[in-house]
Image (tube, grey):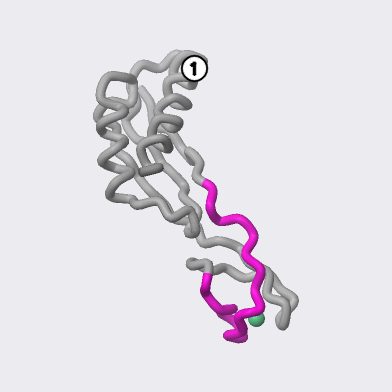
Amino acid sequence: MHEMSLCESIVQIIEDQARAQQFSKVRRVVLDIGALSSVDVGALRFCFDVVAAHGVAQGAALDIHTSPAQAWCMPCATRVDVTRRADPCPLCGNHQVVVEGGDAMRIKELEVD
Ligand SMILES: [Zn+2]
């Protein structure tokens, strides 16, 4: 279950930020997850509560946003958004698309006290 290690790194980043910026409580964490990251949002929320239980992120609300992935459509010669790896081009329906990224996760915003 890679959600647990993802949460460990999220909480680690938050703890580092807390030390660097001297805040002691996090109210809200906004996460941006690439549509192709295959992260289970339910599992992520559960793991976050477990990992954050004894730190500055304890009780923080977790906002999870999903960003579409970008792909290059060869017939259209243009960049399009896809939400799944096997998606056809939304413009022409062709499957000759090359997915670029979309599997990253990052902390978009931290609301702190
Ligand atoms: Zn196309």
Task: Check disc 1 and report its element: helix, strand or loop.
Answer: helix
Looking at the picture, does residue 112 appear above or below residue 83? above
29 lies left or right of 71: left
Does the magenta portion include 97?
Answer: yes
Looking at the picture, does residue 66 appear above or below residue 23? below
Residues in magenta, as a range: 86-104
77 lies left or right of 28: right
Ligand 1 found in image quarter: bottom right
Q: Which residue is mark 1?
A: 21
The C terminus sits in image quarter: top left
Characterize the magenta stretch by its predominant secondary structure: loop
- Residue at left 33%, top 44%? 44
Rate crowding at label 1 as few (under 14), some (14 to 19) or many (20 or more) other CA atoms within 10 Å: few
Choose between 73 and 67: the one closer to the eye.
Answer: 73
The extreme right residue here reads: 77
The extreme front residue here reads: 1
Choose between 113 and 64: the one closer to the eye.
Answer: 64
Amino acid of disc 1: Gln
